[in-house]
Image (cartoon, rainbow, N blue to C red):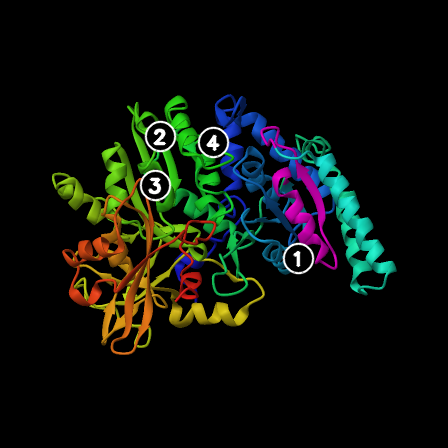
Amino acid sequence: MQNIYQQHLDKVPANFEALTPLHFMQRAAGVYPTKTAVVYGDLRRNWRDVYQRCCQFASALVSAGIGKGDTVSVMAPNIPEVFEAHFAIPMSGAVLNTINTRLDVASISFILEHAETKLLLVDLEYYPQVMQALVELAQPPKVIVINDKSYQGTTLGTMQSTMQDTKQDTKQDTKQGTAQGAAQSAANVAAAVSVSEIDYEQFIASGDKDYAWQAPADEWDAISLNYTSGTTGNPKGVVYHHRGAYLNAINNAVTWNIPQHFSYLWTLPMFHCNGWCFPWTVAAKVGVNICLRNIDVGEIFNLIKTEKVSHFCAAPIVLNMLNNGTAADKAGLNHSIKVMTAGSAPPAAVIQGMEELGIDVTHTYGLTETYGPSVVCAWDSDWDNLDISERARLKSRQGVRSNLLEGLMIADPVTMQPVPQDGETMGEVMVRGNIVMKGYLKNANETKNCFAEGWFHTGDLGVCHENGYIELKDRSKDIIISGGENISSIEIEGVLYHHPDVLEAAVIAKPDGKWGEVPLAFVKLKPTATVTAEELIAFCKTRLAKFKIPKEIRFIEIPKTSTGKVQKYSLRKLI
């Protein structure tokens, strides 16, 4: 029997509409049409113009046969076209797939095939890699080229001429009988070259600026597809829905207390978790997108000062680069600047360096599977009067669940019981809620396993402090077990970062006949550094328990993923 609240109180169009971040831009254009939306070099566009371009883009996509369930991939840096893609592609009903611009050809090819990409937008800089990747596909997608005028490399005509030469070479190989697959490769390259003549601006111009796009009927519909960094094999395709994208965009605004019309600098790649959902957050707050093609320390500081940037996001590696900028670059920061950092655990020394520049750091934690940041080191005003090093140490903790994450715990993965809040007992970080992915594309078993017992299992190990703040200690595969004791590589790295000569540090487990495993540290020194490995070990001895001290330190260029995470599997190959 229905209760009184289930009678004649149905969900109808008048009282329900699916959540989608696409409405943020529609509102921004309607309420603040002349407010600046995008800044890129000399280019400035207001919200009305950007919205009309997105409508045209969506209309052109539909006319090209793109619709619900289709994947449209984008491979480009942080330029205005990628911001537009975050709205226009889902406005057409399709799913946005932003591809990491630093991937190798094989990975690009895998993603395009796995995602069943129907249309690919590529910036001119990445045209050669994409063309090589398309050769590997049985059915290459149509290609639209973004001809960014600020790119100073080879012209499209020259690149296409080179591809035609490649096609002729491949045909010659076929005549000589070198490989049966050469003919197919030649056909694929030919197809890629012909469709690549479509120019992005011409494509948009073919659309209707008054296109009446339709919001999704179901907020559970996919809005985007993001691939993990694939550090242990092929990347996994993480599917986001409109509801989650909407909620995490709002989550960003609430977590950071973002004001209306804020100025946001794109130092974080938009290909990474859809820029942590910030394209949609900026639209929700009618902010200004300041686009940045390449990470350049001098240009970042210049834009912060000239465009009065109030907010930006960056991985700890970028913060470290800023800390090591020139005195001239760092001078003149006289307005409120906030940075959100995540991607890997930031050493306290890096946070302290930012704070000393007057840049307020918000440390967050999340994964591709959680739309980016979902846990935040929420600041407690009781900590305001602590000295800067202690504040930095507290900020290096990952923190507590953000407003729109329903569940967070550190638990024993076998018993699923939360660990004591003692800051010592390690368990696995687990989360659940509306800002957790739909699942992995075409990978039911992996989806089922990571959602076991009603929680998303992150694979990260951490502790829970007395105040409920969590702190990561390692990835489960990166923990060092020496003589039966668990050693956090993050703790050792944090100590090394405090040495003034250390630019970067990474610690892994090295097999040891006596202890099972011992810490091995890899360090990249600053250009003017003079410290020796022995001196660094002595430095660690004054700050770490004896069993945690690295037994060896090697000076190398530390390998990283495109998002700044250290590739520890590559370091293990060096043992």
Q: Residue 60 vs residue 20: left or right?
A: right
Return the residue at label 4: 289
Who comes first in sequence, dot 1 or dot 3?
Answer: 1
Tell me whether the residue at label 3 lies in contact with that at label 2, contact meaning CB atoms closer than 8 angstroms: no
Mark carried by residue 221: none
Question: Residue 232 in the image: x percent, y percent?
Answer: 48, 65
The amino acid at mark 2 is: Ser
What residue is disc 3 on? 527
Looking at the image, which is closer to me, 50 or 386? 386
* Up-down relation of residue 476 to residue 338 (above or below): below
Instruction: Kindly identify the amino acid type of the residue bearing the numbered disc 3.
Output: Pro
Viewer-proximal residue among 180 and 175: 175
Task: Choose top left, top right, bottom left or bottom right for residue 472.
Answer: bottom left
- Identify the residue under disc 1: 116
Please provide the residue range marked out in magenta.
123-152
How crowded pointer 3 is (Cα within 10 Å; few <14, some 14-19, many 20+) is rated as: few
Q: Residue at x 25, y 65 (%)?
A: 551
| 326 or 358: nearer the viewer | 326
Give the CA separation, mark 1 to mark 2: 39 Å
